[in-house]
Image (cartoon, rainbow, N blue to C red):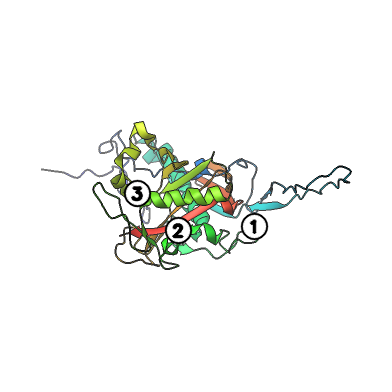
Amino acid sequence: MFKEIKMAFGTAGGYGNLPNGNFSPIIYSKQVQLAFRKGSVVDAITNSDYFGEIANMGDSVKVIKEPEITVKAYSRGTTITPQDLDDEEFSLTIDKANYFAFKVDDIEEAHSHVNFQELASNRAAYRLADQFDQDVLGYMSGYKQSALHSAADTANTTTNGTVAVSTAGTDELLSSMQLDSASFGGTAGDALTIIPRLGGNTDSTPDVGDTYPLTIIARMARLMDQQNVDTNGRWLVLDPVFIEVLKDEDSRLFQADWGGSGLQNGLVLNSLHGFKVYQSNNLPTLGTGPSNTGTNSSTNFGVIVAGHSSSVATAEQINKTETYRDPDSFADIVRGMHLYGRKILRPEAICTAMYHLA
């Protein structure tokens, strides 16, 4: 016969911290069931040279853009007029702030076999990083979040400061670097329909607006080549749905002998058409997402993004992490704040594709 064991200490009315009494040593194991973590990729793909240079909300980091140099023809006797260099700059404003705060009661801490404060702090750090990824991946793809801790799901129409180039849209991206169905003969604004090129598949001429996953990646590489983007430092972030279709097309792509490395901080492939390939669940998802099937859609799709390590700058700081005594009870309160900002510096080095399954 199973008998439920209750915590020996009473609980004041309205007290809601760890309501299940799971700090009792009778029922609390030393083994803790940890949640799975999504691989964080933003720090690996953005220019984070400005980490630590900020301290407060509203701070700005000035980023100097490389000056353009004019080359002129020279003939003997020509008077040389030196060019004045342009020191154009961008402001990377620290306009994002997220925090966590939790409480550990003295009695619960004393009767626990694990360091729950450390456990909760580690989880809090992960949640801050996860939110950071969702926001920045959405921003660099042209989308924004409608709520914290969710993938970006709304088109971004608000410019963060000044656009890096005059031809960029309000999402700070170049329309020529955004792939949709029209890029392969379909309708503008509709998602690309991707189909796996399975072994024995003789369909070499997909319908308009349909294409193979490797063809999309090759097109992204070509667009970057035409923009003179350095091949060293290119990256590509894909979601699990797109990764699955790639595996169907050629499973050898993800074997170690072909450059695959397994899921390590999101990195799944060292080189594919010149890109380091990362997997993330934090890419933008609209409507029912990329697993939506059927005709081309402008409302249900996923977004993948490729870029260069210099295309987006991020600056972040864990501004405050502190523990203090709760004045109203015998407990420690732990809280922390994450400040950050992000700025697209080279939109010509970012390419996106909206897609869904056939």
Q: Total marks drawn?
A: 3
Amino acid under disc 3: Pro
Q: Nearer the viewer, residue 140 or 76?
A: 76
Question: Which residue corresponds to mark 3?
Answer: 240
Amino acid under disc 2: Ala
Which is closer to the viewer, label 1 or label 2? 1
Q: Is residue 69 left or right of residue 222?
A: right
Residue 136 visible from this viewpoint: no
Which is closer to the viewer, label 2 or label 3? 3
Query: Which residue shows up at 55% across the image and 65% down it?
Result: 157
Q: Callout 2: 10 Å neighbours few (<14), some, many (20+)? A: many
Give the mark nearest the N terminus, 1 or 2. 2
Rendering coords of residue 2 (x, y %): 14, 43
Q: Label 3: state its secondary structure.
A: helix
Question: Which residue corresponds to mark 2?
Answer: 152
* Looking at the image, residue 252 lies above or below residue 189: above
Which is closer to the viewer, label 3 or label 1? 1
Give the mark nearest the N terminus, 3 or 1. 1
Q: Quadrant of the N terminus?
A: top left
Q: Label 1: state its secondary structure.
A: loop
Query: Which residue shows up at 52% across the image and 52% down it?
Result: 223
